[in-house]
Image (cartoon, rainbow, N blue to C red):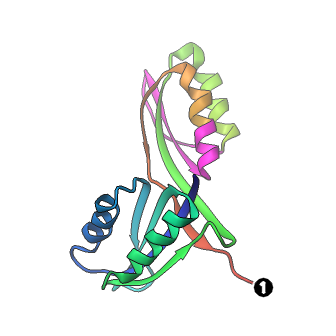
Amino acid sequence: MSQHVISVKVENKFGVLARVAGLFSARGYNIDSLSVSRTEHDDISVMTIVVRGDDRIIEQVKKQLNKLIDVIKVSDHSEQPAIHRELALVKVNCPAAKRGEILQIGELFSAEVADVSLKSITFAVKGDSEKIDRFIELTTPYGIKESMRTGIVSILKERE
């Protein structure tokens, strides 16, 4: 089963998110990641949904999404050149003796220091999911106190 990034432009109305999520749960499809935001138009939102499945499942998901009344457009960003990004906030245990090492890891990943205390450093890391996974993997030995991820956002690349 492969991972697909589905972009769904919808009318920015009450209950649309619940209907889209309900479509997935009613059919037993699991959503790996879901991000929703307004677009350049106040009356339109875009949902970026990451879901795993074979081609048959993904086609079924797209067809069902297109049937929802408030859906404007469905596109599979996995099939087209697209830019995917994610943001994570990662709070790492940080004893004074390890502070330099931990800050170096953050620097290697161009992570922003979002907060510092006597016992921890919180980083904001942005990039593709693999970059964030690798950052978490390298900071895990120090002890991750807490982490939060936004989920993927995606935009198609401009065609020349």
Quadrant where the C terminus is found in the figure:
bottom right
Residue 44 shows in the view? no
Q: Residue furthest left?
A: 14
Dot 1: element:
loop
Q: Is residue 148 magenta?
A: no
Compare residues 55 and 68 and report the one nearer the observer: 55
How would you rate the neighbour count of disc 1 (Cα within 10 Å): few for under 14, some for 14-19, many for 20 or more?
few
Viewed as shown, does residue 76 lie left or right of 8?
A: right
Quarter occupied by residue 27: bottom left
The image quarter in which residue 77 lies: bottom right
Residue at image coords 57%, 20%: 141
Q: Is residue 114 magenta-colored?
A: yes
Find the magenta span and give its range.
Answer: 110-134
28, above or below 75, in the image: above
In the depicted view, which residue is nearer to us: 150 or 31?
Answer: 31
- Give the left or right position of residue 135, taking residue 46 as reference: right
Q: Position of residue 104 (x, y in %)?
A: 67, 30
Which residue is rendered at x = 39% and y = 75% of the image?
64
Residue 80 shows up from this direction: yes
Image label count: 1
Q: Which residue is mark 1?
A: 160
Q: Position of residue 102 (x, y in %)?
A: 60, 26
Q: Determine whether 40 is above or below 79 in the image.
A: below
Residue 13: % across, % down: 25, 80
Identify the amino acid type marked 1.
Glu
Given residues 2 and 84, the one toward you in this image is 2
* 65 horizontally vs 132: left or right: left
